[in-house]
Image: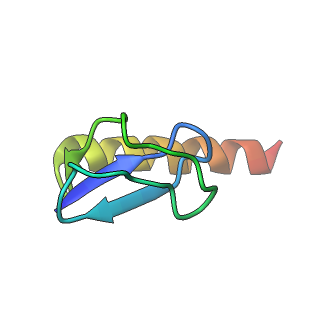
C-alpha cells in the first residue's frame, strides 16, 4: 500500500498502486505527480507527525 501527502491540504491518501491518476480525497487536487511512499514507513510517519504538530501550533496561536 502507498501513501501520498497532498501539498495543498496536507491530507494523507492511500492506495494499493501509485501508478494511476490520484486525486486528493480531501481537497480534490491532482496529486498524481507527488511521490508515493510505502504506507507505514518511518518517513511517512515522520511527515504525518510533523504536519500534526504544525497544525496544533497554528491552533494554539
Residue 37: name its quadrant.
Answer: top left
Q: In this view of the protein, which residue sits in the foreground, 16 or 60?
A: 16
Number of numbered markers: 0
Left of 45 or right of it: where is 47?
right
Q: Along the line of sight, which residue is nearer the eye, 46 or 60?
A: 46
- State the image quarter where residue 1 is shown: bottom left
The percent coordinates of residue 39 (x first, y second) are: 21, 57
Check the image and tell me how it is coloured. Answer: rainbow
Relative to 2, is 54 on the left or the right?
A: right
How far from the left and from the top, in percent, is residue 59?
77, 51
In the image: residue 13, left or right of residue 39: right
Extreme residue toward the right, this view: 61
Quarter of the image that includes the C terminus: top right
Q: Is 25 rendered above or below residue 61?
A: below
Residue 51 x/y as whole percent: 51, 44
Task: Depth check: give the residue in front, 23 or 36.
Answer: 23
Image location (x, y in percent) of residue 24? 50, 56
- Nearest the viewer among 24 and 21 is 21
* Vertical comparison of 31 with 22: above or below: above
Eyeballing the image, is 8 above or below 49? above
User: Which residue does the image show at 38% across and 42% down from the upper left?
Assistant: 32
Amino acid at each position: 500500500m502507498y501513501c501520498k501527502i497532498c501539498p495543498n491540504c496536507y491530507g494523507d491518501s492511500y492506495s494499493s498502486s501509485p501508478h494511476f491518476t490520484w486525486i486528493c480525497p480531501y481537497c480534490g487536487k491532482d496529486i498524481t505527480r507527488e511521490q508515493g511512499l510505502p504506507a507505514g514507513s518511518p518517513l511517512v510517519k515522520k511527515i504525518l507527525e510533523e504536519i500534526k504538530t504544525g497544525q496544533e501550533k497554528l491552533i494554539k496561536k
